[in-house]
Image: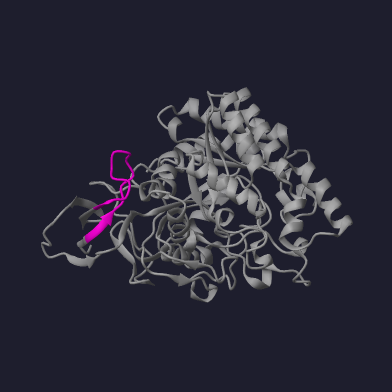
């Protein structure tokens, strides 16, 4: 492998004893690892990368992506990993489940997951791992083996799937989820999933710190009722209508249910995903007080931090949970600055134009849910975070070390001797305008279209492989599947 020497960059470390705004230093990369960090390191035949006046971040661990949800997994593994590299993302944790979308099949993960690994193998430009969703009773029984044999240590519950469609209207549960007709995907199932995850933690105590359960916190019954109300009243349209159809208190209620079940089942490692509203965060903080035994982690997305129902570029911003009014965006920032948010992600789900929109492009309920945005995660957080007083160290923790630590990736997410040479170099003085056409993603639109960002990723290294050089993706796919703990 090429030996690199990154010279004179502002090195952003994640430990709390490091300078909040970084230190001027060099980084030597040898055999895919960080060999040394310090001032005036010698080149020793290394290829020099000048990082003068630039920020050197640990590679981003984007802990929430969805490869293969709308496009073939083999395609997304290549194109969306290239978009990831554009944004300084060096590791993606992508959600996967049985049922409609993804591989469009049911059955046991013993049969399903090898197909997932095969479809992604050799195609990604960045390292990757998978979260899996236990959709059936059979899947719950597979959790210990998935953790011990396949290196899958994180699992997910989609709380709203019980009786609500993915895109906003009710559907046949058994058809959509491809589960046995005599089973239900409901609150009882969520409890049994929690018991299954906790059983795996008890069976494999050495893995227990890395095994966690994540929840998409929305309640199907509230959303189904409010969707009918919004459509019948007809006074709202677009993103405002979609937000009202999946109201903020639905999130708060789901958070509360999840917390009580976690306490009931004794499962301590709970991740509350993409919280989007003041009410959701209020519930999350209250539940942390009520159940101090539960180690809650709270996630928000860059989409919910940068866009609102008025400034997002069109219905391409439809996502679950919805983009919210500005007052919710400001509430998220207040919690983030107060230290109540553990990590920031993209929730990247590439959905091409011909798939995204219905026959009536102005009907938000006919559009598919989800959009890409991993390439804007680090630049967007640096841009807006610095305006609001967020330190560089805190940004690095939010996008790198915190998710790496939670999800069993201790070799990732930080700049330290001996760690993987996963590095993102950012020019903090480059102002640029977001255009979907400039992205390596196959998605032809973006809710961030026209946004002006004041930080740009120039170079990305994945285990010492330079996959982005001077803003352009380079080389061949070098990403690996990460069996965890890694």
Taking depth in this image into account, of 306 and 140 the one nearest to the observer is: 306
Q: Is the residue 164 above or below the residue 1 in the image?
A: above
Q: Is residue 177 left or right of residue 56?
A: right
Q: Position of residue 468 (x, y in %)?
A: 35, 68
Residue 29 within the segment the image draws in magenta: no
* Identity of the residue furthest to the right in this view: 232
Identify the residue at horizontal 79%, vertical 54% (top origin). Answer: 169
Taking depth in this image into account, of 160 and 322 the one nearest to the observer is: 322
Q: Is the residue 235 above or below the residue 328 in the image?
A: below
Q: Position of residue 57 (x, y in %)?
A: 34, 54
Colouring style: one colour
Taking depth in this image into account, of 181 and 302 the one nearest to the observer is: 302
Identify the residue at horizontal 36%, vertical 54% (top origin). Answer: 59
Q: Is residue 399 left or right of residue 448?
A: left
Identify the residue at horizontal 22%, vertical 55% (top origin). Answer: 24
SS assignment for the magenta stretch, majority: loop
Q: Is residue 84 left or right of residue 466?
A: right
Please report the bounds of the magenta region as a residue range: 8-23
Question: Is residue 163 at all visible to an observer of this figure?
Answer: no
Q: Position of residue 2 (x, y in %)?
A: 22, 64
Locate the N terminus and report the quarter of the image it occupies.
bottom left
Taking depth in this image into account, of 268 and 32 the one nearest to the observer is: 268
Question: Is residue 435 at all visible to an observer of this figure?
Answer: yes
């Amino acid at each position: 492998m090429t030996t690199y020497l990154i010279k004179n960059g502002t090195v952003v470390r994640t430990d709390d004893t490091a300078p909040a705004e970084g230190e001027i230093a060099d980084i030597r990369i040898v055999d895919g690892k960080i060999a040394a960090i310090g001032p005036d390191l010698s080149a020793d035949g290394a290829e020099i990368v000048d990082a003068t006046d630039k920020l050197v971040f640990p590679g981003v661990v984007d802990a929430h992506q969805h490869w293969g949800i709308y496009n073939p997994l083999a395609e997304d593994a290549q194109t969306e990993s290239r978009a990831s590299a554009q944004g300084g993302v060096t590791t993606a944790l992508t959600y996967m489940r049985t049922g409609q979308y993804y591989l469009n099949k049911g059955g046991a993960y013993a049969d399903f997951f090898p197909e997932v690994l095969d479809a992604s193998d050799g195609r990604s430009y960045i390292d990757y791992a998978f979260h899996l969703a236990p959709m059936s009773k059979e899947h719950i029984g597979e959790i210990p083996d998935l953790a011990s044999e396949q290196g899958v240590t994180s699992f997910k519950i989609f709380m709203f799937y019980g009786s609500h469609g993915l895109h906003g209207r009710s559907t046949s549960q058994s058809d959509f989820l491809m589960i046995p007709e005599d089973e239900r995907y409901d609150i009882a199932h969520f409890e049994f999933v929690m018991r299954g995850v906790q059983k795996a933690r008890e069976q494999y105590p050495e893995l227990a710190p890395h095994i966690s359960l994540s929840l998409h916190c929305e309640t199907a019954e509230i959303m189904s009722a409010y969707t009918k109300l919004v459509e019948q009243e007809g006074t709202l349209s677009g993103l405002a209508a979609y937000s009202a159809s999946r109201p903020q208190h639905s999130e708060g209620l789901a958070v509360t249910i999840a917390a009580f079940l976690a306490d009931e089942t004794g499962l301590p490692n709970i991740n509350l995903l993409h919280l989007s509203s003041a009410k959701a965060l209020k519930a999350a903080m209250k539940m942390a007080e009520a159940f101090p035994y539960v180690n809650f982690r709270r996630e928000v997305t860059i989409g919910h931090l940068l866009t609102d129902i008025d400034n997002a570029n069109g219905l391409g911003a439809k996502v679950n949970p919805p983009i919210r009014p500005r007052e919710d965006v400001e509430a998220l920032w207040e919690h983030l600055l107060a230290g109540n948010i553990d990590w920031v992600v993209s929730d990247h789900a590439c959905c091409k134009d011909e798939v995204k929109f219905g026959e009536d492009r102005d009907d938000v309920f006919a559009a598919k849910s989800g959009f890409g945005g991993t390439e804007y995660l680090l630049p967007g957080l640096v841009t807006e975070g610095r305006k609001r007083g967020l330190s560089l160290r805190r940004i690095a923790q939010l996008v790198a070390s915190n998710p790496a630590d939670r999800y069993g990736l201790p070799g990732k997410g930080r700049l330290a001797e001996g760690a993987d040479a996963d590095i993102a170099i950012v020019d903090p003085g480059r102002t640029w305008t977001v255009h979907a056409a400039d992205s390596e993603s196959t998605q032809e639109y973006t809710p961030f279209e026209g946004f002006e960002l004041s930080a740009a990723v120039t170079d990305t290294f994945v285990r010492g492989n330079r996959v982005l050089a001077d803003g352009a993706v380079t080389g061949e796919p070098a990403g690996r599947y990460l069996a965890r703990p890694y």
